[in-house]
C-alpha cells in the first residue's frame, strides 16, 4: 500500500462526519474514464505513465474539509506513488497520467470509486454517495519506469556480487584472527574460547546468553555485555536468527565462543535496520549463561 493511500485512510478516520461544504467553482473537463480535471499550468514533456514514480505536492479535500496538505509541510513537502500497471480508468491514477513535470492541476474523483476501486474498501459511513474528493496537485518530478528498472538492475548486480563474495570475505577475515575455526555444513564458523563440561541445551529449552554482535569491519551493531542482563530465547523456536539456534545447540552450558556466519544464517538479502546491509556476514562473541530445561 503506497503512502498516499495510508495518509488518506488515516485522514478519513478523523474527519468529522458532518463536514460537507460546497464544491469549488472550477470549470473542469472529464477523462474517458470519468475523472474530472482542470490543468492550471501545463508544461511540455512526456506524460506520466504506468510504472513511473511520481513526486508531487498535494492538497486533498472532501468538499471544503481539508484531509491532507503537503503545501504547508516543511518535513514532508512531497507525496510520491508508483503508477500501477494497468491502473483502473476513472480513478486517481487515471488523472495523474494527464500530467507532466511542473504541471499543476485539480483532479476530482468520486469517493465511492476511490474507496471501492482504489483503496479496495468501502467508504466510511459519513461519506455520502456521490461525494467527490478534490486533489490539488503540483508535479515536482518523475522517475520513469525505464529508469527505475535500470536502477533495480544495477542494484541487483551489486547485491549478486556481494553475495558471491561473501564466503571469500569470511575466509579472509578468519585468516586474520589466527584462530582455528570449525565449519559446519550450513557454513557457520565457530571457535570455542572457553570450554566447560556443562550439559547441552535441547530444542525447546529456554537459553540465556550474553553477546556482542559485529560486522566484519569490527563495527558493533548490538550487545548486552555492558548491561549484564542476559538475553533469553527458546532454542529451536525460530525466535532468533538461524546461526544462533545452531550454535547454542552445539555449545555446552557455560561455554563462550566466537562465531562467524554467512547472511543465510543471519538477515539475508533484506539486512536489518540501518547497520546490517543485505548479504552481510556477522560475527558474534557469545556466552552461554544458562539453559532452563523443559525435559
Image (cartoon, rainbow, N blue to C red):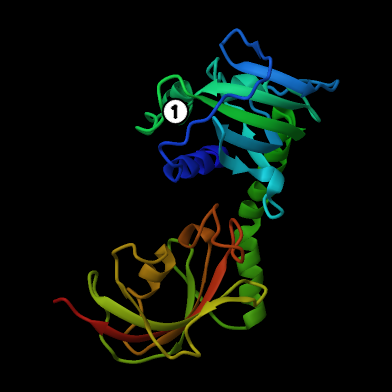
Q: Nearer the viewer, residue 228 or 120?
A: 120
Q: Is residue 202 visible?
A: yes
Say which residue appears at 56% left-offset and 18% top-offset: 86
Q: Nearer the viewer, residue 180 or 274?
A: 274
Q: Nearer the viewer, residue 113 or 16?
A: 16
Say which residue appears at 62% left-offset and 33% top-offset: 82
Q: Which residue is mark 1?
A: 115
Is 115 placed left or right of 99 in the picture?
left
Could you tell me how many numbered marks the image carries? 1
Residue located farthest toward the top when viewing the structure as drawn: 32
Q: Nearer the viewer, residue 255 or 280?
A: 280
* Within-10-Å neighbours for mark 1: few <14, some 14–19, many 20+: some
Say which residue appears at 61% left-offset and 53% top-offset: 163
Q: Is residue 77 visible?
A: no
Say which residue appears at 61% left-offset and 16% top-offset: 36
Q: Position of residue 5 (x, y in %)?
A: 52, 37
Q: Is residue 260 above or below residue 89?
A: below
Q: Position of residue 148 (x, y in %)?
A: 70, 35
Q: Position of residue 19 (x, y in %)?
A: 47, 36
Is 1 placed left or right of 171 in the picture?
left
What quarter of the picture does the C terminus occupy?
bottom left
Residue located farthest toward the left when viewing the structure as drawn: 295
Query: What kind of element bears circle 1?
Result: helix
Q: Position of residue 136 (x, y in %)?
A: 67, 31
Residue located farthest toward the right when viewing the structure as drawn: 44
Amino acid at each position: 500500500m503506497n503512502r498516499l493511500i495510508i495518509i488518506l485512510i488515516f485522514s478519513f478516520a478523523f474527519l468529522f462526519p458532518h463536514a460537507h461544504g460546497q464544491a469549488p467553482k472550477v470549470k473542469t473537463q472529464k477523462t474517458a474514464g470519468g475523472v474530472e480535471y482542470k490543468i492550471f499550468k501545463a508544461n511540455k514533456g512526456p506524460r506520466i505513465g504506468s510504472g513511473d514514480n511520481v513526486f508531487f505536492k498535494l492538497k486533498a479535500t472532501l468538499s471544503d474539509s481539508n484531509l491532507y496538505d503537503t503545501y504547508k509541510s516543511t518535513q514532508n513537502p512531497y507525496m510520491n506513488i508508483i503508477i500501477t500497471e494497468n491502473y483502473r480508468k476513472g480513478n486517481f491514477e487515471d488523472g495523474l497520467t494527464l500530467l507532466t513535470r511542473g504541471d499543476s492541476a485539480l483532479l476530482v474523483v468520486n469517493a465511492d470509486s476511490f474507496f471501492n476501486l482504489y483503496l479496495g474498501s468501502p467508504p466510511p459511513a459519513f461519506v455520502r454517495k456521490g461525494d467527490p474528493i478534490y486533489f490539488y496537485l503540483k508535479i515536482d518530478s518523475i522517475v520513469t519506469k525505464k529508469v527505475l528498472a535500470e536502477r533495480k538492475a544495477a542494484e541487483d548486480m551489486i547485491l549478486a556480487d556481494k553475495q558471491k563474495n561473501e564466503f571469500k570475505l569470511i575466509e579472509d577475515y578468519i585468516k586474520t584472527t589466527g584462530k582455528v575455526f570449525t565449519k559446519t555444513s550450513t557454513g557457520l564458523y565457530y571457535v570455542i574460547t572457553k570450554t566447560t563440561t556443562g550439559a547441552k541445551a535441547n530444542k525447546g529449552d529456554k537459553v540465556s546468553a550474553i553477546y556482542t554482535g559485529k560486522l566484519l569491519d569490527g563495527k558493533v551493531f548490538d550487545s548486552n555485555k555492558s548491561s549484564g542482563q542476559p538475553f533469553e530465547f527458546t532454542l529451536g523456536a525460530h525466535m532468533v536468527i538461524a546461526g544462533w539456534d545452531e550454535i547454542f545447540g552445539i555449545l555446552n552450558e557455560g561455554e563462550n565462543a566466537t562465531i562467524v556466519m554467512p547472511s543465510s544464517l543471519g538477515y539475508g538479502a533484506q539486512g536489518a535496520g540501518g547497520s546490517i546491509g543485505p548479504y552481510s556476514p556477522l560475527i558474534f562473541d557469545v556466552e552461554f549463561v544458562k539453559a532452563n530445561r523443559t525435559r
